[in-house]
Amino acid sequence: LKDFDFNFLVDKSWIGCCLGFRHWEKIGIYPTHYVCVDSVVCEHHRYKILEMIEQNKCESFLICGSMFKTDIGDKLKNYKNVVPIQNIMLSQNNPFRYLVDYCSGTSASLYGYILGFDKVNLLGMDCQYVEFIPECIEIDNGKLKIIETPKDNPNYYFNEYQQKGDIYNKPNVDRVHKNSWQDLRNIFLLYNILQQKDILIYNYNAKDNEKLDNYFEKKDINELKV
């Protein structure tokens, strides 16, 4: 996404995740739907997420249910377009019930499925996290903290995605993220059969990546159509 022109998405339905709001705010373009289901990231950035909700920046928000137990919980209850992922996972006949390991990327993809998207195009998700960047330290319960805003962040398409003071969960790529993408592929296959649909996921990442390339058809971003 480093050189991607977000104007391409202005008149299209798309889903954005997590701290992408730092870029959207600069360019004045927000996603149709917002997803962030990492409890640590949600709670640490809850005021910014609430601001987006109150200002109607997106049509809907899929977030971690723990946010409803924070100091902004009562405000969140006033918005019907704010959905806790835990509620969806408890719904009957819902593919989220089978997403055992999940991250914001896989949750966003499955959210697109239940919203009725006819396909899911992955941009900016490659499941190749550098677990510990030099600008972070480990704190309690496996959490990481950014102690200096990275000048060159290998994990995101703009270096200011993470900034000094940010707290987040260690990616745990092999234990969580990789399994999550594999689960997602299998859920899509299952629900396409059950619902007689043919909704596919396309991987628009330039890097060769065995973690995603094994699961989804790879395409060149220059051929992107939404």
Image (tube, grey):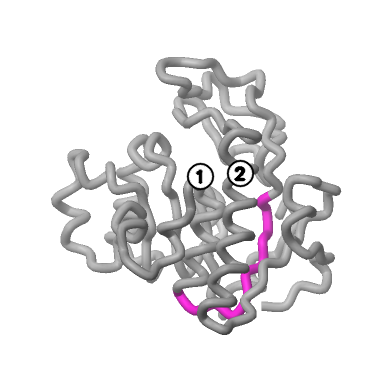
Check residue 179 in the rendering and tell me which mark sits there, or answer none.
2
User: Residue 196: image x %, image y %?
Assistant: 57, 84
Q: Residue at x 47, y 21 (%)?
A: 142
Q: Residue at x 57, y 47 (%)?
A: 180
- Dividing the image into 4 quarters, which one contains the N terminus? bottom right
- CA gap, disc 1 and disc 2: 6 Å
Q: Is residue 52 visible?
A: no
User: Residue 63: image x %, image y %?
Assistant: 36, 52
Give above or below for 13 relative to 92.
below
Foreground pick, 50 / 169: 169
Q: Residue at x 69, y 30 (%)?
A: 130
Q: Amino acid at mark 1?
A: Asp
Q: Which residues are magenta?
A: 115-125
- Dividing the image into 4 quarters, which one contains the C terminus? bottom right
User: Residue 62: image x %, image y %?
Assistant: 38, 58
Check residue 101 in the rendering and tell me which mark sits there, or answer none.
1
Among the two numbered marks 1 and 2 on one chain, the one whose residue lies closer to the N terminus = 1
User: Residue 53: image x %, image y %?
Assistant: 31, 59
Foreground pick, 12 / 25: 12
- Judged from this view, the residue extending furthest toward the bottom is 196
Q: Amino acid at mark 2?
A: Asn
Q: Is residue 124 visible?
A: yes
Q: Secondary structure at mark 2?
A: helix
Q: Are marks 1 and 2 in contact (CB under 8 Å)?
A: yes
Would residue 124 be counted in the magenta stretch? Answer: yes
Give above or below for 144 relative to 123.
above
Q: Residue at x 58, y 53 (%)?
A: 183
Using residue 212 as the reference point, say whether residue 159 is left or right of it.
left
